[in-house]
Amino acid sequence: MSKAPTKVTQGLLHCERPIFAASVPGRSGASLPTLDVPEPAADAWPAALRRASTPHLPEVSEPQVVRHYTRLSQWNFSIDTGMYPLGSCTMKHNPRVADVAVGMGEFARLHPYQPESQLQGALQLLWELEQMLAAVGGFSRVSLQPAAGAHGELAGLMMIRAYHTDRGQTRRRVLIPDSAHGTNPASCTLNGFEAVQLETSADGTLSPDTVRAALDDEVAAIMITNPNTLGIFEKHVAEIAEMVRGAGGLIYMDGANLNAIMGRFRPGDVGVDAMHYNLHKTFGTPHGGGGPGAGPVGVSERLVPFLPVPTVNRSKEGFTLDYGRPKSVGRLRSFFGNFGVLLRAYVYMRELGAPGLARVTDLAVLNANYVRARIRDFVHVPHPDMCMHEVVANDQNLRSTGATTMDVAKRLIDHGFHPPTVYFPLVVHGAMMIEPTETETPDELDAFIEALRSVVEEAHKQPEQLKSAPHVTGIGRLDEARAARKPHLRYQPAGEDES
Ligand SMILES: *Cc1c(COP(=O)(O)O)cnc(C)c1O
């Protein structure tokens, strides 16, 4: 990082050095009035409170600061720059009206320590959001507390554990299909459960026979993702739920893919006891890079007593926060949820209405199937039948070329597209998981498909072009393992490079 960049620019894309490299002693971006009080003596502060050294700050002009950060922002890819077909993540356009609401002073200037009497509007909004989410999922109640999908899984499994404990049972095992997101087994382990892996059938779904063979009175719950991470609807979900329930277990559904079913299928109706909603995926919040998010968890009647506190209740006197729930699993986080994300989801749902949400589902599924039908000409799609909101391809007909899934992903960047999710789900070798979302137009989908086609054709003719991609970015291919294990986070002036 300390060395002068080899490439200075790519066209107008600046190869930006760390801002410390631009520092010139005495240069300033701020003009302060001259001191109108006496300068304090050097020993005015007790020795213990004095700094041992001056902080190392860059000394730069205001335009330098503005350009530096603006240029860095141009190195980022975002949904506002182009299509972002990252399967499982649901990177879709976020309506600006939601951001307008979040910026309104009436919301932005609220403080969670204000008395409830001054928070009535915000509490009403949370209460209404809970009603809407419960209606979409078919649940009795919804906790808005969890800060992300994985946090919702944790909350749901905590409630499931509390449910069994309350009935005097110590059930230890949770059944999870092998196509599940890694957060599922992780949430089990954090709750002291043992994750038992179930094999997906050849058709990409979970078979009732597989579940039956694994069921006994030690099973606390099954965790199903529906549609699953192969983009396929688990058509046996009702039968499996009934079977697990018959054996005394509960049913958790990973609802990260709700944008493929909302308005068309309600998990609560087929016996699901708990499900998280990834508001930042399904209901629009600019996400990626680690947040922010919200992962409310909906529950059936059986789990209502165990909901985290606080819940928002409505009475004749108005809206209140309820902390007095004796069987609650307790608090999951500070205050009452990631309010800005909850507000965006509220606006999104009010803007679209129930028919609009169903249409989101229909278009997300239509777009994914359009992509599936067209890419089958040049990449292998292991489950070629109708998919839901995403389609999984693999590297089967690339193997003879020497190019890998990763090479295809990197070369797509040269065509102006963010790559799809790669090497996930783990059950598909060399997977490429494409989720176009409902917000892309047919011409954008066509452009993506043609880019992918030309990359695959190139793999057969000139695989070395893929191996060295991307070519037209500021930075080429990183050693990803080294970047993750030995991140270079501190700027070292030239000549003091530690590595
Ligand atoms: C995104 C995702 C999760 C985790 O959700 P976060 O909000 O990222 O914590 C869990 N399961 C599936 C299937 C997902 O796609």
Image (cartoon, helix red, strand yellow):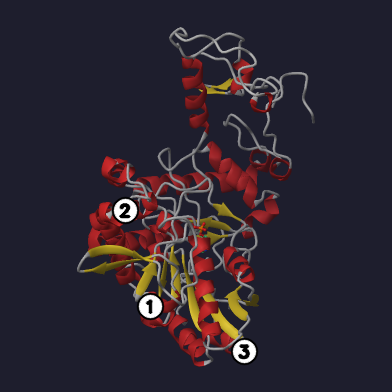
Image x and y of residue 422, in percent: 59, 54
Name the residue type under label 2: Pro
Q: Residue at x 33, y 43 (%)?
A: 108
Mark 2 against mark 3, which lies toward the viewer?
2
Residue 455 lies left or right of residue 346; in this view the side is right
Mark 3 or mark 1: whose residue is earlier in sequence: 3
| Percent position of residue 223, x then y | 53, 75
Q: Residue 345, image x and y in percent? A: 34, 55
Q: Are marks 2 and 1 in contact (CB under 8 Å)?
A: no
Q: Which residue is mark 1?
A: 268
The x, y position of residue 299, in whole percent, is 41, 75
Residue position marked by numbered label 2 in the rendering = 115
Residue 178 figure quarter: bottom right
* Above or below, comparing residue 170 to residue 499 in the picture: below
Quadrant the C terminus occupies? top right
Q: Amino acid at mark 3?
A: Ala
Q: How many neighbours does mark 3 have within 10 angstroms: few (below 14), some (14-19), or many (20 or more)?
A: few
Label disc, if present, on residue 213 of the rendered structure: 3
**SS at badge 1:** helix
